[in-house]
Amino acid sequence: MRTEAKELKLFPHPFSWEYWRTAARELKDVRVLVFAAMMIALRVALKSVSIPVAADLNISVAFFVNAYGAMIMGPVVASLAAAVTDTLGCILFPKGTYFFPFIFTEMAGSLIFALCLYRARITVRRVVLSRFCIDFFVNILMTTPIMSLYYRLILGKTYTMFHLPRIVKNLALFPVESVLLVLFLRALIPPTSRVGFNVPPVDDLRFTKKNAAMLIVLFALGCAAVGFYLWLRGNK
């Protein structure tokens, strides 16, 4: 049986009180909370599952679930769900010593996906920008000082600032992850709408020449930023 979704109000940006009030009200929606529990379970279960792309390059399956869940739950519920996911993942599938600050990277990823996809016209541009922000600002910039603290406080070692292999991996995967995420959301949004969740239509999730150009430009910007950093290091 199909469940009718309530009228969906879209916001052009997340910089309004009404947007955040709407996101906070998701905490009172039982269906959203049940959905959040399902997304947490899926993300914990899929943390170690990845799609091999090339030698030493793998795409984590959990990030698809993260984006999909954030789109429906909104920034408030998605951020809390990310914190629970990180904690449960460390308890059920421990890898090394638990270090609390890593929870902020998990939450930041969910928050960015939600800010770009929740209650918005979901376009290829929004999806690509969300993935770029996570790969560049979270996985590279934000993770670096946390990794440095982890190595110094927990392992008693020195961590190379802006670890090059990790940077190259994130930049290399960005275009592939972006395209796959667009296809994933395009496939999942129609059935999600049919069961009553508030999601926009998929009419704008079509790649155009402008979208491809944006993907190339962002990739080039990321590479240029890395090149500039390496140049600065070489001239010190």
Image (cartoon, helix red, strand yellow):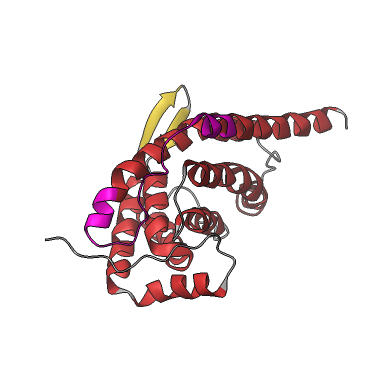
| Residue 223 image offset from top left, x and y in percent | 67, 30
Residue at image position (63%, 52%) is 146
Quadrant location of residue 193?
A: bottom left
Residue 200 is covered by the magenta coloring: yes
Q: Residue furthest top?
A: 55
Q: Which quadrant holds the N terminus?
A: bottom left
Most foreground residue, 216 or 205? 205
Q: Is residue 27 above or below residue 141?
A: below
- Residue 51 position, x and y percent, is 37, 32
Q: Position of residue 175 (x, y in %)?
A: 51, 31
Relative depth, front residue between 178 and 169: 178
Q: Residue at x 81, y 32 (%)?
A: 233
When asked about the image quadrant of residue 28, the answer is: bottom left
Q: Residue at x 70, y 43 (%)?
A: 158
- Residue furthest out toward the left: 1
Q: Please tell me which residue lies in front, 75 or 92.
A: 75
Quadrant placement of the C terminus:
top right
Q: Is residue 100 magenta?
A: no
**What segment carries the magenta color?**
190-214
Quadrant of the rendered image containing residue 70: bottom left
Depth check: give the residue in front, 173 or 207: 207
